[in-house]
Image: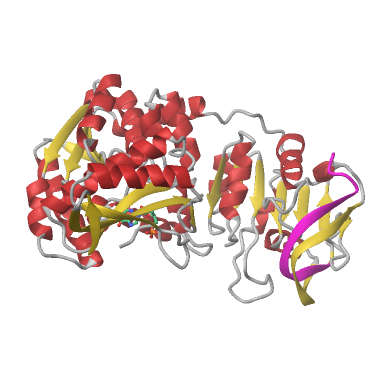
Amino acid sequence: MILIIDFGSQYNQLIARRVRECRVYCRIESPEVDIDYITNLKPEGIILSGGPSSIYEKGSPKVDPAILNLGIPVLGICYGMQFMVSALGGDVKRTKKREYGFAELNIKEQTGLFKDAGKKTDCWMSHGDSIAKLPKGFKTTASTENTKIAATANPKKKLYGLQFHPEVHHTPKGTRMLRNFLFDICECKHTWTMKSYAKESVNQIKTVVKDKKLILGLSGGVDSSVTALLIHKAIGKNLTCIFVDNGLLRKDEGSKLKKTLKQHLDINIRFVSAKNKFLKALSGVTDPERKRKIIGKVFMDVFEAEAKKIKGVEFLAQGTLYPDIIESQSAFGGPTAVIKSHHNVGGLPKNMKLKLVEPLKYLFKDEVRLLGKELGLDDDLIWRQPFPGPGLAIRIIGEITRKRLFVLREVDDILLEEIKNGGYYKKLWQSFAVLLPLKTVGVMGDQRTYENIIAVRAVSSKDAMTADWARLPHKLLGKISNRIINQVAGVNRVVYDISSKPPSTIEWE
Ligand code: XMP
């Protein structure tokens, strides 16, 4: 296990991704963790991340310097390196010119971090401070034109520092350097697999939940489905899943999910049909934010009422993922900041007083998919595109009525079928249809029509923070448009959304 100390770098998740890609487990922790906590974790190595602060600034984040004397190998990256140097008696100074972007790295010896990294290689710099003087026992191991001490090492103490960022892909030999740190210097083993994770996680859930009851809100997405399978493996019948059909789902979604999950396991699922409640509360509402608030509130009312029917529940499980935790934990935040991440969990009713179980909270999305595969989840569910909680309500611009829901569902179903047939479903982050509150004139047969417009949206993205509109082939777009107009009564025009995020968003509302 590798411990990453988070000094606030925008690249922290990337460091964790790179380590996990090497099949080594890692955790990101705040610099405020105390030394006993660190020794208890028994990390094979420690990575001190970069960060936006200057080491000599008042209030800049610091970790207990005893971390450098545990005999555990440490790699400091950018600010992390400056922290290490400064804590051990070296000097860090502001550079005249901020260095940002590519630089050519001249490597002195191809050993340690630089084994097999060549003599010269590109590296990615992003710093305003530099090392002016190294502490005793350290030597310069690489430099660039602007930065004399671009890398340093004290091999005897297993302390290493890089001024540049090995985790970004602009440093082509970066992964090689990280691997050298993990496998040569820290002597890690490639043991991080989803098989081992599943086993460990099931044992942990058993220890925590024991013979008590647990409930889980099942949405039909990959995160909550994998959470369900994992917990079911641990506590069997004591898990009850609650699936709320809010009437805003895609065509046949509820029944498909029921079939998929039941097919595999004998999971206890309560399917609650609450369509009327949701539609009544949404009647006449057109404002997107009000739609979201109403849906959230009705969901909690329904979920709570259902949960109360199950006697003796003590735990509530959620499919929270690692990025949610990392994003809500600041470099300066202690445990209180971490708790904030849980509020997305849907504002749990306070009087429920349930203890939280979040078995995926140290996993990234692609790892959750691998874990789902390991647990035997259907490919259909594993590769399901994200679907927003408020469902079709935010894809019907304007008022939500049964009739408009029916039209959008039929259109959406055709669109997905064509996207899947064309081999694009897994390649796209999301693909969906939006029903506009506008009508235009058309002609069908010899008849004039005056019907709805559908907008088709298809985007590629890594994490939904940014997205690009998908360059789908014209032939496929033509087929989609043709089928929608011919097969769905009430639609006579289809347009394709060619905006990226930013400045647009993925959803239209
Ligand atoms: P935007 O539209 O903000 O969407 O670019 C980014 C991602 O978030 C999803 N999304 C939501 N998910 N509740 C959700 O659970 C919501 O209210 C919501 N709004 C947007 C969206 O589908 C996309 O994947």
| Picture layout, residue 293 above or below residue 37 | below
From where the camera sits, is residue 317 visible?
A: no
**Taken as a whole, is the magenta stretch helix, strand or loop?**
strand
Picture residue at 44% right of the left edge, 27% below the top = 373
Say left or right for 156 vs 305.
right
Colour scheme of the rendered structure: secondary structure
Give how far across and how far down residue 388 sits, in percent.
31, 51
Question: Is 347 a magenta residue?
Answer: no
Question: Is 118 a magenta residue?
Answer: yes
Picture residue at 35% right of the left edge, 40% below the top = 416
| Picture layout, residue 192 above or below residue 145 | above
Picture residue at 37% right of the left edge, 39% below the top = 223
Q: Quadrant of residue 251?
A: top left
Q: Quadrant of residue 103?
A: bottom right
Part of the protein shown in magenta: 116-132
Picture residue at 15% right of the left edge, 33% below the top = 270
Give how far across and how far down residue 119 sits, in percent.
91, 48
Foreground residue, 497 or 395? 497
Residue furthest front as drawn: 446
The C terminus lies in which quarter of the figure? bottom left
Find ligand 1 in the image and state its quadrant: bottom left
Foreground residue, 444 or 452? 444
From where the camera sits, is residue 20 visible?
A: yes
Give how far across and how far down residue 271 sits, in percent.
15, 35
